[in-house]
Amino acid sequence: MDPATRRAAGEAAAVRALALPQLANARTVLVYAAMPEELDASPLAAALRTRGARTAYSRVCAPGGLTLHWSDGDDLEAGPFGIREPAESSPKADAAEIDVVIVPGTAFDESCRRLGMGGGFYDRLLPRLRPGVVTIGLAFDEQIVDEVPTEAHDVPLDLVVTPTRTMKRPT
């Protein structure tokens, strides 16, 4: 995908996500810094900050572990795997403070299951969050597949948003 198409997709997904009632009153949102194959979450993060939400980003702290840090996204630096993350000295966020998590992935399906990069970082993080936290995957339309293979430890999301669709996990 060329940069203009990628940018337009990120902006369209942000507009769609911002219309969700689950984001209307979000005060604290964990977002991600996109890798080249992921939908850019920065337009959504910027719009949420404009609404008054505080944003946090994850930082790899050990094999398979993440810490959360408050950031406006401007202070991110290259970390393991080339993923941009907050500096270790950034103010830490407690998982209990997070209202909404914007989750990256490689593939998603209409049942809001996701396939990550294989490290299990989010599958370990999501159960640490307080009950009721809303989880939203952001994806290109091309990342939606018929069925994502899952294992017992895989955590489905509440919603998946693409530039053209919003999918909700079946109840």
Image (cartoon, helix red, strand yellow):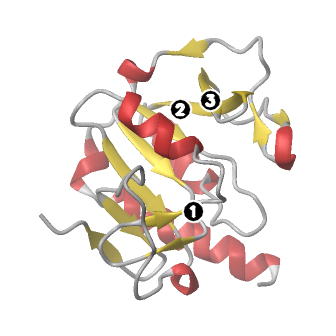
Relative height, residue 146 to residue 46 (above, below):
below
The N terminus lies in quadrant: bottom right
Q: Secondary structure at mark 2?
A: strand
Residue 105: mark: 1
Where in the figure is residue 50, as x and y percent of width and height? 49, 39
Q: Residue at x 70, y 75 (%)?
A: 6
Residue 55: mark: 2
Dot 3 crowding, Cα within 10 Å, few <14, some 14–19, many 20+: some
Q: Earlier in the sequence, mark 3 or mark 2?
A: 2
Q: Amino acid at mark 3?
A: Leu
Q: Quadrant of residue 85?
A: top right
Q: Quadrant of residue 121?
A: top right
Q: Earlier in the sequence, mark 2 or mark 1?
A: 2
Residue 149: mark: none
User: Which residue occupies the foreground of this view, 40 or 119?
Assistant: 119
Q: Secondary structure at mark 3?
A: strand
Disc 3 designates what residue?
Answer: 66
